[in-house]
Amino acid sequence: MGDRDRFRFLKTGNSMKYYLLVNPYGGVKKGLRILQRVKPIFEKAGFELDIIDSTFAGHIKELAHQLDFDGYSGIIVIGGDGSMHELINGMLTRHDKKQIPIGLIPGGTGNSFMHDLDMLDPIEAAKAITEGYIRPIDVMEISVNKITRYAFNIVGWGLVTDVGKHAERYRWMGERRYTFTAVLEVLTLKPRPAQLVIGDKKIIDDFSFIIACNTCHTGKGMKMAPKAILDDGKVDLVVIRYNVTRAKLLATLPKLFDGSHIHDPAVEYYQTDKFSLLPKHNETLNIDGELLGSTPIDVLVKKHAIQVYDRKQNSE
C-alpha cells in the first residue's frame, strides 16, 4: 500500500466504544428494523455501542455538536443523506473542534453518499465499519448572510430546487412524483438572471439551474456528476442556461441517470475548488436534499474535512 493509500485508509485505534444514532420512529420504524439486523454484527466484532434515539428534526446535529467524543472511536448513524447532513454540520461546528470517524448505515429515502461508496446494503455497511478502515472526504463550506453551512452531497439552485419543493404536492404518486414534477417545471420554466463566478471565470446570464456536486450521485441513483470524486478537493458544477429549449431540456433529463448528459452541448460542466452565485432575486437552495438557506452564496471546498468508514478493498 502506497503513501497515498496509507493516508486515505487508516485502521482506527484500540477503543471499541461507538455512538450509534437511530430514529426508531421514522420510515415506518425502518431505522429500528435495521438496528435489529446490524446490532449482532457490531456485538460479534466486540463493539461497545451507546445507542441514542434521534427523536426530532435537528436532533442528530445537536448530538454531534454536544456529545463527549473522548474515548470513542467513531459515531454511527442509521439514516440517509439528511442524517449525514445533520451529523456533519453538528461535528464541524463543535467548540472543541474534536472529530471522530463517521459510519453511515443506509436507512433513508435518499442515499447518494452510499451510492458513491457502493454500499446500499445495511449489512455490508455495518461490516465495513467493523473492519475499521477510514478515509477522508471533502465537504463544501457554504457562506450565506454571514451564516456558514456544510454540504457533503449537493448545493442546487433553480429548477432542481423547484422540483424538490413542488413534488411534495404529489406525494400520493410515490417516487414517480419527482419525474412528473420535473416535467411540469420544465414546461413552465422561467429565466433566472444571475452572476456565476467559478474561480477566475465570471458568467452573467439567465440560467435554468446550477447544481454543485461533491458526490457522483444525487437523489435515488441519478449520476448527476459522473466525474465527481469524494476526496479530490474539487466540486463539480453542472450548469444549464435558459437559452436551452424546453424540448432539449426534457430530452436531457433521462440522461441524468447514466451520466451521459455531460456530453450534451446543452450542459456545461466545471470542476473547481470555489464558486459564488449571485442571482438577481434571492431564492431557496437545495442543500443535501433539504430546502435550506438562500442566495447569494459563496462556496469553498474544504479538502479532507471529515473522515468516514469505507471498505478496505477500495484502497487497493
Image (spheres, grey):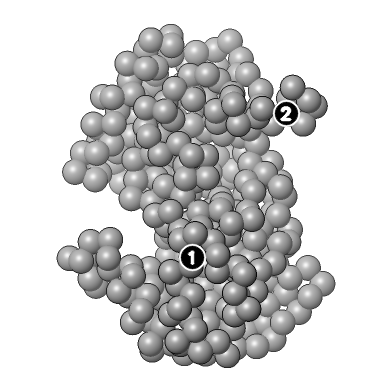
Instruction: Name the foreground residue: 142 vs 5.
Output: 5
In the rendered view, does 167 fall on the left or right side of 201?
left
Residue 234: tell me if it is visible. Answer: yes
Q: At label 1, which amino acid type do we have?
A: Leu
Q: Quadrant of residue 78?
A: top left
Residue 70: tell me if it is visible. Answer: no
Instruction: Tell me how far mark 2 sits from mark 1, CA to CA.
Output: 31 Å
Instruction: Name the foreground residue: 82 vs 221.
Output: 221
Q: Quadrant of residue 123?
A: top left
Q: Residue at x 27, y 65 (%)?
A: 176
Q: Residue at x 30, y 74 (%)?
A: 180
Dot 1: what SS? helix
The image shows residue 63 at horizontal and vertical percentages of: 44, 37
Q: Earlier in the sequence, mark 2 or mark 1?
A: 2
Q: Residue at label 2?
A: 5
Q: Residue at x 55, y 69 (%)?
A: 261
